[in-house]
Image: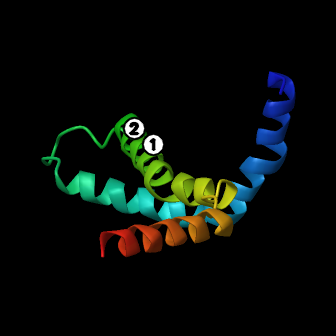
Amino acid sequence: MSDDIAFKIQLGIILPKLKDTVGDNLSNIIEELVSILSYGTLEGEDKVELSAVKEIIMKDIEIFLDNDVLPALDAKLNPPEPEPEAEVNEESAEEAEAEEVAE
């Protein structure tokens, strides 16, 4: 896919959906993180650096995607192939024959 088309898809489809579906919740999570980080700063020190907040959130989003979203999507797109019944039946027959010979 060309970079131009991918960029248009990102701006036209993905970003609006992200804003609509997770925008408010993500903003609340980030505000909570800023609040937690501000408790760790001493009075009179610099305020919380937004670049640090962004770095934490981006790492968490990557972990969330890697651990939850992408494995579920991969399982959906690439389900395990079931064993053909003929092979299973042949194996069962071979096992039964082997047990008869052993007796």
Under mark 1, the amino acid is: Met
In front of the other: 63 or 16: 63
Figure disc tally: 2
Q: Is residue 72 left or right of residue 95?
A: right
Quadrant of the snapshot with the N terminus? top right
Q: Position of residue 52 (x, y in %)?
A: 34, 37
Residue 99 in which image quadrant = bottom left
Q: Which residue is mark 2?
A: 55
Image mark for residue 26: none
Q: Position of residue 78 (x, y in %)?
A: 65, 53
Q: Under tag 1, what secondary structure? A: helix
Q: Which residue is mark 1?
A: 58
Residue 5 in which image quadrant = top right
* Image coloring type: rainbow
Residue at 18% across / 39% down in the picture? 45
Q: Is residue 86 left or right of residue 11?
A: left
Q: Residues within 10 Å of mark 1 (few under 14, many from 20)?
A: few
Residue at 62% across / 57% down in the picture? 73
Q: Residues within 10 Å of mark 2 (few under 14, many from 20)?
A: few
**Compared with residue 27, is residue 14 higher up or lower down, i.e. above or below?**
above
Residue 30 in which image quadrant = bottom left
Res 84 visible: no
Quadrant of the snapshot with the C terminus? bottom left
Q: Under tag 2, what secondary structure? A: helix
Q: Position of residue 67 (x, y in %)?
A: 43, 54
Label 2 close to label 1 by CB (< 8 Å): yes
